[in-house]
Amino acid sequence: MRVTVLGCGRWASFLGWYLHKAGHEAMIWGRPGSASLRELRETRQNRYLTLAPEILLSDDLPRALGFGELIFISIGAQNLRSFLKTFPAKPPVPLVLCMKGLEADTGLRLTEVTREVIGPHPAAVWVGPGHPEDFVRNIPNCMLIDSEDQGLTRHIADSLGSGLIRFYYGGGIIGTEIGAASKNVIGLAAGMLDGLGLSCLKGALMVRGAREISRLAKIMGGQEITIYGLCHLGDYEATLFSPYSHNRRYGECFVRGEAYGQLAEGVATVRSLCRISQERGADLPICQAVENILSGRIKGGEALGSLFLRSIKSEF
């Protein structure tokens, strides 16, 4: 296929690299004046990878929207609404959202944001574990495609698979999007545990985090079992333990009082989850503890210590 990637950062550049490797004709689009796009144009590489000469680069949005049979979007989740509003017309082909987050101001899932801005349109999400740093060294992993249309899900997953990434069909778009977004919040908590010297509690975090988010998925209209798949629990290794995880590293630096300059989507997502908790009556103690630490209401050690040492209760 001919495919377009909108975005040219860490994950977007990997998408272009991977889609070409999987046998597709790829174009990567970046905003006019983008430093990341300029670097790719001048050197065909960034700190993560080197692009094949056949991969097209462009800052012409109408051209990019008309190029591919699928359009992959990989930008900051909080910028999706404003970005979609810059489209000159409704895209002629399905969109694949390759970001994990909830809109901070509304609590909406990203496919819901897309529907609000451009109306009914075929859209899927690409989520699951994996870091460009591993993939470019030919370390394989499994990932997930999901949408409201099972035919679209199967078409995308079947078209993109390779020996490097095996794709699975998602089990429900609501649970998939909530699980993928909220695993970044659990990643922040994991980093905070690392920074406080409490990494031994990550096992408890994994068990309780998955249970907490599965209850949320049910409240939001999704299926609890989805959270135990690749969108959430299956992504814990890459998010809670990997040195490449921005969210884990952000949480670690935050409790140590150190600056961390990379995007951590979990920071905005946890605000959305706490808002949903209040509106829907969902019990989200881990998410609330992370938000209390980030907002400065409670110190890290006090919040996480009280969270894991609170009154005796059943495991499930």
Image: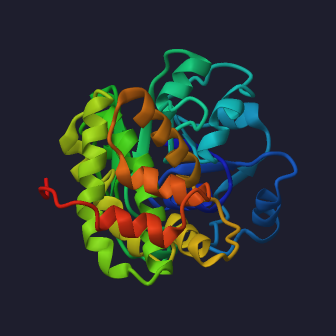
Q: Position of residue 236 (x, y in %)?
A: 34, 64
Question: In the displayed structure, does residue 63 sit left or right of residue 159?
Answer: right
Question: In the displayed structure, does residue 228 sit left or right of residue 197?
Answer: left
Q: Quadrant of residue 240?
A: bottom left
**Outermost residue toward the bottom in this view:** 197
**Outermost residue toward the top in this view:** 119
Residue under the point 71% across and 25% down: 85
134 lies above or below 272: below
Q: Of 178 and 207, which appears nearest the observer?
A: 207
Q: Of 6 and 130, which appears nearest the observer?
A: 130
Q: Position of residue 137 (x, y in %)?
A: 46, 79
Q: Position of residue 293 (x, y in %)?
A: 54, 60
Q: Quadrant of residue 199?
A: bottom left
Residue under the point 13% across and 53% down: 316
Instruction: Count the marks.
Output: 0
250 lies above or below 215: below
111 lies above or below 273: above
How are the residues colored? rainbow
Residue under the point 79% across and 66% down: 39
104 lies above or below 267: above
Query: Is residue 263 visible to us here?
Result: yes
Query: Is residue 19 visible to us here?
Result: no
**Outermost residue toward the right in this view:** 33
**Outermost residue toward the front in this view:** 311
Residue under the point 25% across and 68% down: 204
Q: Position of residue 307 (x, y in %)?
A: 35, 62
